Amino acid sequence: MEYDGTRYHGSQYQTNAPTVQGEVECSLLKLTGEAHRVSMASRTDAGVHARGQVASFRTNKTLPLKAWVSALNHHLPKDISSTAAYEVEMGFDVRRHAVRREYRYCIMNRPAPPALCRGFCDFVRWPLDVDAMNEACQVLVGRHDFAPFASVADGRSTHRRVFEAGVSGRGDLVVFDMAADSFLPHQVRNTVGGLVKVGLGKTKCDDFRSMAASGKPGVVGPTAPARGLCLMSVKYRDFPPSQTETEE
Amino acid sequence: MEYDGTRYHGSQYQTNAPTVQGEVECSLLKLTGEAHRVSMASRTDAGVHARGQVASFRTNKTLPLKAWVSALNHHLPKDISSTAAYEVEMGFDVRRHAVRREYRYCIMNRPAPPALCRGFCDFVRWPLDVDAMNEACQVLVGRHDFAPFASVADGRSTHRRVFEAGVSGRGDLVVFDMAADSFLPHQVRNTVGGLVKVGLGKTKCDDFRSMAASGKPGVVGPTAPARGLCLMSVKYRDFPPSQTETEE
């Protein structure tokens, strides 16, 4: 699924606020006449976008996979789009079986605020040192305790494996990409907040590394705005295996 | 200037509807206390975006060029942004002195409608033959009578010089770029409408060429939706010459 998260209070269902899960469940109800409970592969916060979210549900309705996609899009609001459908084994867990999640964060880096696509990037007026940011974020790669990047300490493990992290400049845009087995709440946005300080010269590369390795909860930040963040993809081992993929 | 044209009734001032010119003049009034008449380099229709529009005005107010940009952005709505300011000679005509205008049209070409950036591209569900579209549009390059691409016949010359035209695929996006000395009303959108028919196999490449060369007013179309179109840049001979540019 792809969605523009601007008007949603995140991916996860809430009783009194519009959420992505709520919209998908409502559309499925219209489509099948059944109440479905939908699970999401990666939880996204209020205002965060997705290009490659994955959602799963159990249904008694039989439809060709192509028809699921087009019928769902018929009922979904314009800011949510189903891009593909797969049939999976009964034991499939869309969240626990995911082995890799990729997030991207975009920053418009120039003196003038962005008018185009302003809902999909943060804005930093002063020049960012992209090389310094890219160097600093290499410390993230590998299996580490990411407690310093977590906004919430709930007693669960804060160890994660980061496969890749990188910052690159594309014209006026500074793009941060990060792939990991899974992420702590606010981890990407806190990482970006910390890296922007490096890019502005407010934090030295070595100090960022020290904070990252300190094990102290929540020392890296501030939390960058939600609108710059996008869940790019979720990957599964051997997926889609025997299942038939469709693009509609 | 850059703007998201979604909520504007075009670039040119209208009494009873929000326009880009109206917003800029209003912001200048707040900034200087003077009523200004603003001229735009290229007229854009309702819903059309710009990344590189140029606007000029005469003022008695003296401010550093950087301050013009930041002060104007302070007053402008978030969907309009001033990106640079220049001081020019008194005789400068922002519209008549422009020698090259570049437009881009984006089409999301896949079965699922776009949820992200849906305000900045058209959507074509069926696969487009990008090579055929690119081949067809080469007939546009050069100095020709573009009456077949004009929506309005007002008796003025319909001859224009197209410097470049091209269609390329970038993932799910099909991008059409066109540069000319100037454009007729709806010319780019009618061109895109005609090229989409070529891409879908509804019009043969040779038939597109025949229509393009026919001289018959308004035979190429339909007019593609405004939201896919963006004015990318306007170029001047020797500009900025002695003028000092600033990015803020």
Image: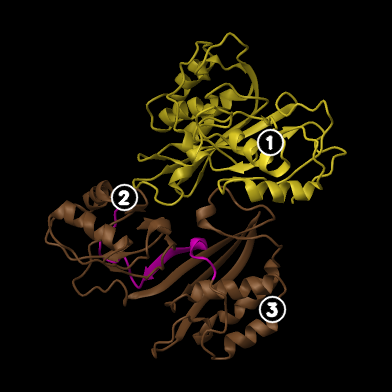
Chain colours: A yellow, B brown
Q: For the residue carrying disc 2, how many other residues have a C-alpha within 10 Å: few (<14), some (14-19), or many (20+)?
A: some
* The disc label shown at residue B77, or none: 2
| Chain to which mark 1 belongs | A
Amino acid under label 2?
A: Pro
Task: Decide whether residue B234 is among the magenta residues.
Answer: yes
Above or below: residue B53 compared with residue B148: above
Where on the picture, by quarter, is residue B137?
A: bottom right
Mark 2 to mark 3 CA distance (whole Å): 42 Å
Task: Decide whether residue B239 is among the magenta residues.
Answer: yes
> Is label 3 in a helix, a strand or a loop?
loop
* The disc label shown at residue A173, or none: none
> Is label 2 in a helix, a strand or a loop?
loop
| Chain to which mark 3 belongs | B
Q: Which label's residue is closer to the chain start, 2 or 3?
A: 2
Amino acid under label 3?
A: Thr
Where on the picture, by quarter, is residue B202?
A: bottom right
What segment is highlighted magenta in the picture? B224-248
Q: Position of residue B91 (x, y in %)?
A: 21, 75
Q: For the residue carrying disc 1, how many other residues have a C-alpha within 10 Å: few (<14), some (14-19), or many (20+)?
A: many
In the rendered image, the residue lying farthest to the front is A33
Give the residue pinned by disc 1: A54
Kindly tell me whether residue A79 is visible in this rendering: yes
Mark 3 to mark 1 CA distance (whole Å): 38 Å
Q: Position of residue B245 (x, y in %)?
A: 29, 57
Residue at x-position 67% and y-position 43%: A30
Closest to the observer, A73 or B29: A73
